[in-house]
Image (cartoon, helix red, strand yellow):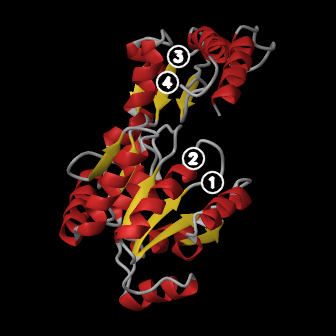
Amino acid sequence: SAKAGIIGRYAAYNLRSQISPKGSSTDLKSMRIVHGIHGLSFYPYLRPAVNWFYITIEKAAARRTDAFISVADAMTTKSLAVGIGKPGQFTTAYSAIEEEEYLNPLTREQRNDFRKKYNIPENAIVLVTIARLFHLKGHEFIIESALKLAKRFDNCIWLFVGDGILKDQLQLKIDAYDLTDKFRFTGLLPTSQMPLVLHSSDILVHCSLREGLARVLPQAMLCGVPAVSFDIDGAVEVVNGNTGRLVEPVNVKLLNEACEELIADENLRKQLGANGREFVKEKFAPKTMVDKIEEVYKKILK
């Protein structure tokens, strides 16, 4: 986490400042400190005083850091905007995905078996959300959106993949809106089942309010599934007008419009899905990530 990254860098810096033990082959002063940014400790939904505190200690930690590896360009941009680090310290390396697992299509039988398991009709349009049932993950916006969309499209099912402390609260909200038959909860599923989940779905809906770059976005695209996502952090780096729809955060009206457009047009879904697959292919390959990180290490160890 970002907080652990601050503590870790201070510990490494203090170790580097020490004199190497007599007879040791390790030169502590040659140690280099690299920090990976998967998410930032400061974000819009924290109190200003808390953000100020985190930004202040991040700035101090940056002076003790040789290089940053960001999971998205957005992490770099936001850090530099508040004075954390210098441009030359940052490199973006997208988190690797075993692409072949997602590129391989399902058989119709596999898809139908998955749907039967969760009582989803074969001809239903499935809007899937893969995220912990937790604060800032945005499930409440999806439920609000479904309240309107379900009235127009009676063949839609919303699938929540994940588990968390908000499960009962979300279920109560769904029941209160009389949407019980429109939602399915899978609980926590292993990562190995994500290709099955995505290939069995039609639209990914991602309404998280805090992300670096959600892995589920490129994962969905590799499966040919278009995404509707809140415009948060690194989402814009993979979701655009040709691969899906970006929506102003917290704006349920715009979320409805984006989902409605894709629900109503199967050809558009297929086109956006195909575009997304081509757009992200190889960008998230393990070799691409390893090569980027290796470049960083070579640079700082010269």
Q: Position of residue 76 (x, y in %)?
A: 42, 24
Q: Which residue is mark 3?
A: 66
Relative to 40, residue 125 above or below: below
Q: Which mark is residue 132?
A: 1
Q: Amino acid at mark 4?
A: Phe
- The tag earlier along the polypeptide, 4 or 1, is 4
Q: Which residue is mark 2?
A: 137
Q: Position of residue 248 (x, y in %)?
A: 37, 38
Q: Position of residue 278 (x, y in %)?
A: 23, 57
Q: CA distance from mark 4 to mark 1?
A: 27 Å
Q: Position of residue 33 (x, y in %)?
A: 59, 21
Q: Nearer the viewer, mark 2 or mark 3?
A: 2
Secondary structure category for the residue under label 1: loop
* Cβ–Cβ under 8 Å for marks 2 and 1: yes
Q: CA distance from mark 1 to mark 3?
A: 33 Å
Q: Nearer the viewer, mark 1 or mark 3?
A: 1
Q: Amino acid at mark 1?
A: Arg
Q: Residue at x 39, y 22 (%)?
A: 77
Q: Quadrant of the C terminus?
A: top left
Q: Which mark is residue 68?
A: 4
Residue 149 horizontal side relative to residue 194, left or right? left
Q: Specify few, some or many for label 2: CA neighbours under 10 Å numbering under 14, 14-19, or 20 or more.
A: some
Of residues 259 and 173, the one nearer the viewer is 173
Q: Amino acid at mark 2?
A: Lys
Secondary structure category for the residue under label 2: loop
Q: Specify few, some or many for label 1: CA neighbours under 10 Å numbering under 14, 14-19, or 20 or more.
A: many
Q: Amino acid at mark 3?
A: Asp
Q: CA distance from mark 4 to mark 3?
A: 7 Å
Q: Residue at x 30, y 49 (%)?
A: 245
* Cβ–Cβ under 8 Å for marks 4 and 3: no
Q: CA distance from mark 4 to mark 2?
A: 26 Å
